[in-house]
């Protein structure tokens, strides 16, 4: 589609005429200074008026918007106050409801407790009435026996025997019921009995595992003593190794200390309670490495063998306990070879 301005031949003529008209108008104004000043004043006044109108309109719009925002803020504050009042009212209603509920719960508990007290008191009175009725029946029976004995229907020995039996029954029943109520009957519920607390006996596994070293210990006494001795040797060896490695400037001193730590960490899984039997010779091996590397292999081999024997002994005792009657114990007379 072709451009209309380039194809229409009248457009340039119209533009040229407009330019000529503007030039002629400006020339006429400049020829007459009064008309020129009046024209400039009118233009300035019109532009100023338009500018002022725009400013006033913008100010009026901003003022109106600010009033609306102010009203919205007031409304929001009013809503906030109303919501606060409603919340306070609900809190008061909730407090009243909670107080009423607590009162009902208290009355319910009090009523239940009072019912328990009344039941206990009523049953205690029935118990007393039962004993008095029994005592009255026994007295009546004794009077009948005395009447029969005086009339010669029964002998004196037989009457005395029956009287003693009846008195024993009355006294025994009274003592039993009184002692039962005081010591065994629950103070709150009449039909509930208090059982005396007894110490719970330990199971066979707890007795074996928690017993001190000795005949009842799950771990043989020889192995426990050997582990204690190995622990002491391990502490001495570790202290000596640390002192030697710190004071010595020779390279093999630091190598010995590092080797002792690495080997001790590797053999520290010999077993719970018996793993110390493997750590002691290893740390001792670190001390021997610090003083001389000639005996290292011998001491390490001996420590490994001791750890293997301790672990094997523990596994054997565990297997015997699990597969036995649940009361497997170590032989106190068994000899345990300790390499330390």
Image (cartoon, rainbow, N blue to C red):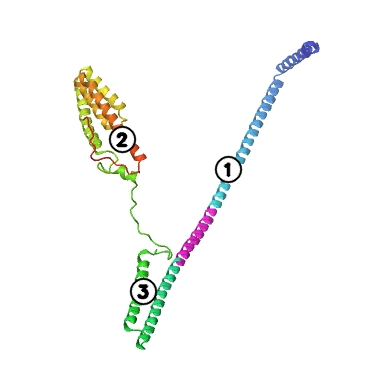
- Tell me the magenta residue range: 88-115
Q: CA distance from mark 3 to mark 2?
A: 63 Å
The answer to whether 178 is drawn above or below residue 5 in the figure is below
Q: CA distance from mark 1 to mark 3?
A: 93 Å
Could you tell me how many numbered marks the image carries?
3
Q: Is-magenta flag for residue 268?
A: no
Mark 1 sits on what residue?
73
Task: Work out whether residue 162 or residue 153 is closer to the camera in this orientation and state it.
Answer: 153
Please indicate whether residue 244 sits to the left or right of residue 21 in the image.
left
Picture residue at 43% right of the left edge, 73% below the top: 126
Task: Work out whether residue 15 or residue 24 is closer to the camera in this orientation and state it.
Answer: 15
Task: Work out whether residue 142 or residue 160 is closer to the camera in this orientation and state it.
Answer: 160
Circles 3, 2 touching at the beta carbon (< 8 Å): no
Mark 3 sits on what residue?
169
Picture residue at 36% right of the left edge, 69% below the top: 176
Neighbourhood count class around disc 2 (C-alpha, 10 Å): few under 14, some 14–19, many 20 upward: many
- Quadrant where the image shows the C terminus: top left
Answer with mark 3 or mark 2, whichever residue precedes in sequence: 3
Quarter of the figure with residue 252: top left
Q: Horizontal and vertical percent for residue 54?
A: 65, 31
Picture residue at 28% right of the left edge, 30% below the top: 309
The secondary structure that most of the magenta stretch takes on is helix
**Marking on residue 314:** 2
Give the SS element for disc 3. helix
């Amino acid at each position: 589609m072709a451009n209309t301005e380039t194809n229409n031949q009248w457009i340039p003529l119209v533009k040229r005429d407009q330019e000529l008209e503007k030039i002629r108008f400006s020339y006429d104004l400049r020829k007459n200074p009064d008309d020129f000043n009046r024209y400039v004043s009118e233009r300035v006044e019109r532009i100023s008026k338009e500018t002022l109108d725009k400013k006033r309109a913008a100010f009026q719009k901003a003022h109106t918007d600010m009033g609306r925002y102010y009203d919205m803020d007031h409304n929001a504050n009013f809503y906030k106050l109303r919501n606060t009042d409603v919340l306070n009212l609900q809190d008061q209603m909730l407090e009243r409801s909670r107080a009423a509920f607590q009162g009902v719960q208290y009355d319910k508990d009090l009523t239940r407790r009072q019912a328990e007290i009344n039941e206990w008191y009523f049953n205690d009175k029935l118990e007393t009435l039962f004993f008095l009725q029994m005592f009255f029946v026994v007295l009546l029976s004794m009077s009948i026996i005395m009447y029969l004995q005086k009339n010669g229907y029964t002998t004196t020995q037989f009457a005395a025997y029956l009287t003693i039996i009846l008195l024993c029954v009355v006294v025994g029943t009274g003592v039993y019921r009184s002692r039962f109520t005081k010591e065994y009957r629950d103070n709150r519920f009449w039909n509930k009995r208090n059982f005396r607390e007894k110490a719970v006996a330990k199971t066979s596994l707890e007795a074996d595992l928690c017993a001190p070293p000795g005949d009842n210990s799950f771990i043989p006494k020889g192995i426990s003593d050997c582990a204690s001795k190995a622990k002491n040797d391990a502490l001495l060896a570790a202290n000596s190794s640390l002192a030697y490695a710190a004071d010595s400037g020779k390279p093999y001193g630091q190598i010995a200390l590092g080797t002792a730590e690495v080997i001790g960490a590797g053999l520290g899984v010999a077993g719970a309670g018996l793993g110390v039997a493997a750590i002691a010779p290893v740390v001792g091996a670190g001390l021997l490495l610090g003083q001389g590397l000639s005996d290292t292999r011998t001491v390490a081999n001996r420590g490994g063998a001791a750890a293997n024997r301790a672990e094997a002994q523990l596994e054997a005792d565990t297997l015997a306990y699990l597969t036995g009657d649940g009361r497997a114990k170590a032989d106190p007379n068994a000899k345990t070879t300790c390499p330390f």
